[in-house]
Amino acid sequence: MPFNHFTTIATDPDYDIERVNEIIQTVPNNDLPLYNIYEYEVFLLLTSIKKTSPGPDKLSYSFFRYAAAELTPVITHLIRLTLSNGTPPEAWKHAVITPVPKVTFPQNLSDLRPISVTPILSRLVEKLIARKYLTPALPTKLLEDQYAY
């Protein structure tokens, strides 16, 4: 099943795996467009990366941007494989977390806000999935005040 990873990490107390499996069984597999990730989409993402911090893998934005032509087929295959398996690579699940104070003199952990920097490739895949699958599925009214991606 393509979404095994997400079912194992769900923290919602009302999450019912049996109900989710029932719903998934009613959707014909050939109607799921998860594997329609095209090289041109990945190439455009890679070449349009803005200057950003590298994640724990230490791969810089310039590596992806300037080697886009060579990396596109490999990254496209990796994304398709990830979507078909439903499990992201282990490296995509790690982040560099930097605590940033919310107040001038933090006294407690609640006075800090965590800033998580995941690998650039992980962020690109999130952006691709959000643009291609999530945003078109949501009503426009819900997205009026949202600015990410």
Image (tube, rainbow, N blue to C red):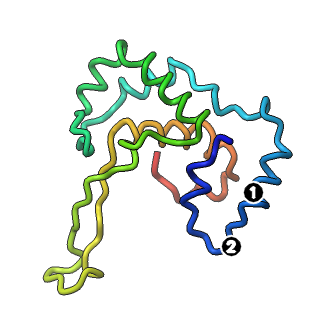
Position above or below: 106 against 75: below
Q: Which residue is drawn at the image coordinates 21% and 80% (left, top)?
A: 103
Q: Position of residue 28 (x, y in %)?
A: 83, 36
Side of 43 relative to 1 (left or right): left
Residue depicted at 69% across the width and 46% down the height: 137
120 on left or right of 33: left
Outermost residue to the right: 26
Residue 20's label in the rendered image is 1
For residue 41, above or below residue 56: above
The numbered mark at residue 14 is 2
Q: State the quadrant of the N terminus.
A: top right
Residue 51 pos. (x, y %): 25, 37
User: How far apart in space, not on screen, are marks 2 and 1 (Cα)?
Assistant: 11 Å
Helix, strand or loop at disc 1? helix
Please give the name of the residue rendered at 27% of the width and 44% of the height, measured from the top-left corner.
55
Q: Residue at x 25, y 45 (%)?
A: 56
- Quadrant position of residue 18: bottom right
Q: Nearer the viewer, residue 8 or 74?
A: 8
